[in-house]
Image (tube, grey):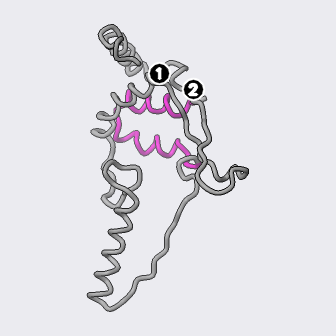
Amino acid sequence: MLLPLLPTLVPQLLHLFRVCWQWSYTPLSWRVAQVVPIHKKGSKTDPGNFRPISLTSTFRKLFEKCLYPSLLEQSPALDIAQGGFRESRSSLDQVQCLIEICSILRRNHNSSPTLAFLDIKSAYDTVDRSYVWSELQSHLCPALLGILKNLFDHVQ
């Protein structure tokens, strides 16, 4: 859709992205999301069987892709055990690792471990972002932290 406009659009977008970065502010239309319920499983009459997906502006998505390298570079390193929501990792990788650890324990110590699994429902939605921002403040430059706050704290 945007491909034919690239020669004209790129310089304009680059200027807009620089202004957004400088002011830690984005256009309101980038902070408006249309939430669409996606059915997971079970009865379609039960609202708990749906998960919300937020549809956002194409320009916001482009801007986020531009921010991503800076975010990766400046963010604190994630623990190697963190598997969810990471590129080239899945929850199955975590399961495979756990199976291997259990096998080693059985083989070397003739013992089976006691395991407990914790699934925090709606963890992303219930985290107080002020804690996240506070933690990131010592790692991110002020412009990046400001733009992330603007993008994620002021969504309509």
Q: Judge from the rendering whether residue 73 lies leftward or rightward of residue 19; answer left or right.
A: left
Q: Judge from the rendering whether residue 129 lies leftward or rightward of residue 147; answer left or right.
A: right
* Image quadrant where one finds the C terminus: top right
Residue of label 2: 32
* Image quadrant where one finds the N terminus: top left
List the single residue furthest toward the top.
8
Q: Which residues are magenta?
A: 126-155
> Residue 93: percent from the left, percent from the top?
34, 62
Q: Which quadrant of the view contains residue 24? A: top left
Residue of label 1: 25
Residue 18 vs residue 141, the one in the foreground: 18
Q: Residues within 10 Å of mark 1 (few under 14, many from 20)?
A: some
Q: In the rendered image of this protein, does residue 53 appear above or below residue 116? A: above
Q: Residue visible at 50% across and 18% down?
A: 27
Q: In the rendered image of this protein, does residue 39 appear above or below residue 101? A: above
Residue 91 vs residue 69, the one in the foreground: 91
Amino acid of disc 1:
Tyr
Amino acid of disc 2:
Val
